[in-house]
Amino acid sequence: MACYTGAAPSVNVVFTLRVNGVGSGLTCTIAAGQKVGSGTGTASWAAGSVLDVATPAAGTPGKPGSFAIFN
């Protein structure tokens, strides 16, 4: 997983891939002062699953971001 935000956060922020509304073991961390982060962990899902990315409750810079999932 890779993640990007349009402005660097002032603290580390961790985004979590969710599968059908449940957090998976795949996260992406953007370090304070950076705009790009890389993922750790794994996740699996079946055809028809709903995927989304959970954002932290605080610390995000409030700018557009993007996420990529790859294997």
Image (cartoon, rainbow, N blue to C red):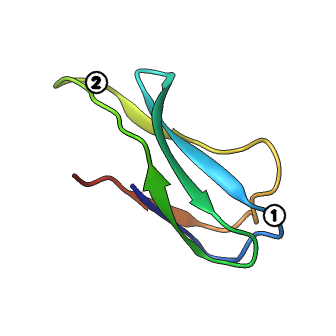
x, y percentage for residue 4?
53, 69
* Count of marks overlaid on the render: 2
Residue type of the residue flagged with mark 2: Ser
Q: CA distance from mark 1 to mark 2?
A: 32 Å
Does residue 19 sit above or below 59 in this rendering? above
Task: Give the image quarter of residue 67.
Answer: bottom left
x, y percentage for residue 39?
45, 55
Helix, strand or loop at disc 1?
A: loop
Point 68% across, 68% down: residue: 31
Residue in front for this viewpoint, 32 or 21: 32
Determine whether, in the image, residue 8 is placed left or right of residue 10: left
Does residue 57 sit above or below 29 in this rendering? above
Is tag 1's residue or tag 2's residue first in the polypeptide sequence? 1
Q: Which mark is residue 57?
A: none
x, y percentage for residue 18?
47, 31
Residue type of the residue flagged with mark 1: Val
Point 22% across, 52% down: residue: 71
Determine whether, in the image, residue 46 is placed left or right of residue 64: left
Point 61% across, 76% down: residue: 35
Q: Which mark is residue 11?
A: 1
Determine whether, in the image, residue 8 is placed left or right of residue 19: right
Neighbours of disc 2 within 10 Å: few (<14), some (14-19), many (20+): few
Residue in front for this viewpoint, 24 or 63: 24
In the picture of the structure, the residue carrying the numbered disc 2 is 49
Point 28% across, 24% down: residue: 49
